[in-house]
Image: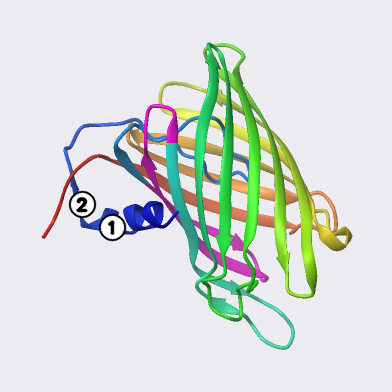
């Protein structure tokens, strides 16, 4: 884990070969599909999440392709602001570190697992002050040349300062439809079965457009379907694959 963190944190000091890799965005949906960052390449995701009048966040993720089937990722909200009575928590959010690996592929279907942990590194007003662990199973199936669907299940163990860890389950189903070589429509329905009977249900609908094969921008809206979910969150972002790592700058 420490070697993984050190590798990802030193990515900004690396140069790349200039070789083009197709970007593999995992944003802005809650779930991930089974795709992974190109082997040996580094990829960055950055975006804006705006819940008008209630919250604002700047999520960011760096990814590194370990192999043609595996990636490492590290992410956090670079800045978040929550509108709450009695004070508005703001600052840097907690850090997520994880890996995704495809364990089985037989065109057009693939299966992957994802492991991640959340570390309480954020500002005190935003951090949970506890370590959380997550494990997910993912299945992606290509229906045809234009359409793919993904099923996602995640099990979480959430640290609880008052006792034993809380268990969280999450389910999501997603679909993507390619209008052409550059533009893809996507949608997702997700529910998080959280502790204390807080179970947000929401759907995310959006469009992604490739400015270049290695640069993909996205626009989406996540709409809450019950009282536990945010009414509507506007999502904007970009995923950029910077190419294969070559050397460290001294």
**Label 1: few (<14), some or many (≥20) within 10 Å?**
few
Say which residue appears at 60% left-offset and 73% top-offset: 127
Say which residue label 1 marks.
10
* Nearer to the camera, 185 or 239: 239
Say which residue appears at 63% left-offset and 74% top-offset: 129
Say which residue label 2 marks.
14
Q: Residue 128 has which mark?
A: none
The residue sitting at the left extreme is: 250
Residue 226 in the image: x percent, y percent?
Answer: 85, 53
* Nearer to the camera, 5 or 230: 5
The residue sitting at the bottom extreme is: 86
Q: Secondary structure at mark 2?
A: strand
Left or right? Give the position of 116 relative to 41: right
Asked if the stretch drawn in magenta spans residue 52, the answer is yes
Tags 2 and 1 in contact by the CB under 8 Å rule? Answer: yes
Asked if the stretch drawn in magenta spans residue 95, the answer is no
Colour scheme used in the picture? Answer: rainbow
Residue 158 in the image: x percent, y percent?
Answer: 71, 60
Residue 122 vs 230, above or below: the answer is below
**Label 2: few (<14), some or many (≥20) within 10 Å?**
some
Residue 84 vs 31, above or below: the answer is below
Q: Secondary structure at mark 1?
A: loop
**Residue 78 visible in this rendered orientation of the protein:** yes
The magenta segment is: 44-70
């Amino acid at each position: 884990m420490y070697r993984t963190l050190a590798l990802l944190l030193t990515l900004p000091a690396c140069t790349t070969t200039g070789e083009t890799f197709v970007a593999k965005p995992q944003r802005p949906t809650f779930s991930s599909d089974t795709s992974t960052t190109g082997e040996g390449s580094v990829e960055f995701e950055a975006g804006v999440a705006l819940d008008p009048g209630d919250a604002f966040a700047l999520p960011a993720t760096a990814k590194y392709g370990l192999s043609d089937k595996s990636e490492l990722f590290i992410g956090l909200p670079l800045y978040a602001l929550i509108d709450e009575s009695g004070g508005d928590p703001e600052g840097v959010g907690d850090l997520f570190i994880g890996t995704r690996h495809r364990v089985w592929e037989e065109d057009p279907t693939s299966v992957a697992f994802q492991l991640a942990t959340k570390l309480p590194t954020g500002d005190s007003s935003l951090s949970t002050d506890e370590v959380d662990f997550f494990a997910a199973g993912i299945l992606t199936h290509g229906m045809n040349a234009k359409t793919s669907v993904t099923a996602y299940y995640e099990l979480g163990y959430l640290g609880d300062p008052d006792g034993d860890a809380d268990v969280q389950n999450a389910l999501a189903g997603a679909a993507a439809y390619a209008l052409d070589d550059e533009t893809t429509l996507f949608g997702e329905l997700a529910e998080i079965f959280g502790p204390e009977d807080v179970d947000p249900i929401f759907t995310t609908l959006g469009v992604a457009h490739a400015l270049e094969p290695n640069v993909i921008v996205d626009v989406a809206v996540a709409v809450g379907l019950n009282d536990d979910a945010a009414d509507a969150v506007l999502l904007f972002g970009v995923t950029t694959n910077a190419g294969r790592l070559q050397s460290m700058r001294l």
